[in-house]
């Protein structure tokens, strides 16, 4: 109700602003006013002649001139300007009083929502936020792509958004469609491989490795592909190969490259102190084991590491090894649980927490 009152006052103010100048019109001169002036002048000439202020000849000449002007004024047609101005003002007043509201209603009815009730005040705090707006935008893009599946630009926009939302399988397909309709490129191949790694919980799978190899075949300087191939080598236990890849990246990179700290941390991880080698008896036993027994032994070692970390949670490197081990074994739920446990264990130590998060980020655990 208050809103409609405000609208009414605004309309009245607009109409008043239009009508006010029309009401301040200049009064038109009365009919015959010019002839009256000349008659007054004749009377004044007669009075001056009677009192001797002017001579008879001068008075006669003045009468002749005033008479000529009086005749000219009497013959001049009356101007219709006054009547025209009155008609124009009346038309403008009608337009302001009736036309403006009519135009406003004609525009509002098709474009506005006159029957939409007011949004409850209690629910305004629950209005859709940025995340809901993003979901709505994604839904619109997906609907557009259903109707236009060959829109390469649409797939290129949608793919990274799906990846950030954790919809990895859909993001993988979106990246594939982007490559199909936009053309092959090193950057698109590297992006596809990255989302495959994220889908696998940080493990560089064989399919992801293939995408990174294709990216480097298209552009040998593709940074993302090189980094993840180094990570694949590390996960395979080939620390020297990983160190060589990352060192080569640093050697070629400019000093201001934003990814240098990430690669430097990764290089420090594989170049740091190594765990003691297994004894010869253990290596020989593992060599003679069946695949199932060897897997059981590895899992047993991983569980012993997990038990040790429960007692000593400050070992950041140990936590990273545990997360990496679970990821390689395919135990993604345990890997996520280890991530949560690691962060809880070092939550009160800012430096250790930073080191942990950087290490987890290199494995694809950004959240």
Image (spheres, rainbow, N blue to C red):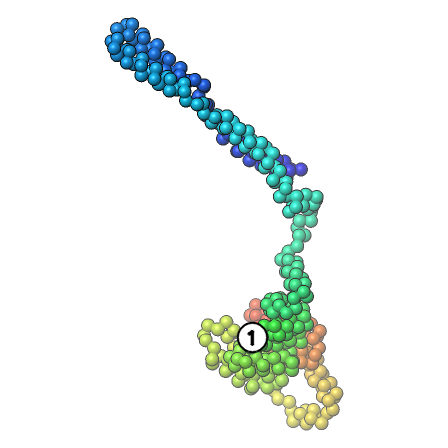
Whole-percent x, y for residue 353 in the image: 59, 70
Residue drawn at (67%, 92%), measured in percent from left and top? 283
Whole-percent x, y for residue 63 in the image: 31, 13
Residue drawn at (67%, 70%), measured in percent from left and top? 170
Image quadrant assignment for residue 199: bottom right
* Secondary-structure class at tag 1: helix
Whole-percent x, y for residue 99 in the image: 59, 36
108 shown above or below 361: above
Q: Nearer the viewer, residue 56 or 346?
A: 56
The residue furthest top is 50
| Left or right for 117, reference 102 | right
Q: Nearer the viewer, residue 325 or 34?
A: 34
Q: Nearer the viewer, residue 100 or 89?
A: 89
Which of the image's four quarters has the C terminus?
A: bottom right
Q: Is residue 286 visible?
A: yes
Q: Nearer the viewer, residue 115 or 355?
A: 115
Residue drawn at (52%, 81%), measured in percent from left and top? 220
Q: Residues within 10 Å of mark 1 (few under 14, many from 20)?
A: some
Image quadrant assignment for residue 197: bottom right
Total labels drawn: 1
Residue with the mark numbered 1: 187
Q: Is residue 360 visible?
A: no
Whole-percent x, y for residue 68 in the image: 34, 17
Residue drawn at (47%, 81%), measured in percent from left and top? 251
Which of the image's four quarters has the N terminus?
A: top right
């Amino acid at each position: 109700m208050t809103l409609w009152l405000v609208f009414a006052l605004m309309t009245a103010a607009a109409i008043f602003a239009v009508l006010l100048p029309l009401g301040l019109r200049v009064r038109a001169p009365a009919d015959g006013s010019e002839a009256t002036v000349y008659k007054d002048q004749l009377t004044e000439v007669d009075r001056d002649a009677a009192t001797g202020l002017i001579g008879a000849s001068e008075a006669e000449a003045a009468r002749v001139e005033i008479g000529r002007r009086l005749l000219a004024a009497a013959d001049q047609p009356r101007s219709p300007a006054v009547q025209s101005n009155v008609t124009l003002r009346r038309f403008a007043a009608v337009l302001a009083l009736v036309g403006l509201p009519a135009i406003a209603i004609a525009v509002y009815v098709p474009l506005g929502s006159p029957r939409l009730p007011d949004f409850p005040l209690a629910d305004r705090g629950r209005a859709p936020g940025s995340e809901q707006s993003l979901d709505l935008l994604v839904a619109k893009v997906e609907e557009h792509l259903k109707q236009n599946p060959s829109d390469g630009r649409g797939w290129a926009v949608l793919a990274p958004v799906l990846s950030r939302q954790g919809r990895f399988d859909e993001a993988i397909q979106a990246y594939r469609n982007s490559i199909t309709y936009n053309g092959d490129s090193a950057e698109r191949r590297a992006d596809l491989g990255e989302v495959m790694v994220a889908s696998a919980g940080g493990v560089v799978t064989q399919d992801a490795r293939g995408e990174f190899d294709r990216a480097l075949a298209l552009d040998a300087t593709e940074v993302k592909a090189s980094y993840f191939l180094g990570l694949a080598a590390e996960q395979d236990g080939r620390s020297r190969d990983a160190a060589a890849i990352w060192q080569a990246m640093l050697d070629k990179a400019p000093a201001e490259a934003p990814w240098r700290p990430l690669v430097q941390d990764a290089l420090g991880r594989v170049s740091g102190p190594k765990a003691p080698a297994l004894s010869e008896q253990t290596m020989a036993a593992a060599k003679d084991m069946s695949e199932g027994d060897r897997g059981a032994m590895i899992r047993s070692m991983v569980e012993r590491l997990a038990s040790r970390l429960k007692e000593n949670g400050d070992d950041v490197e140990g936590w990273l090894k545990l997360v990496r081990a679970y990821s390689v074994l395919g135990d993604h739920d345990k890997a996520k649980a280890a991530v949560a446990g690691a962060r809880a264990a070092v939550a009160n130590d800012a430096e250790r927490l930073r080191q942990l998060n950087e290490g987890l980020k290199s494995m694809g655990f950004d959240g």
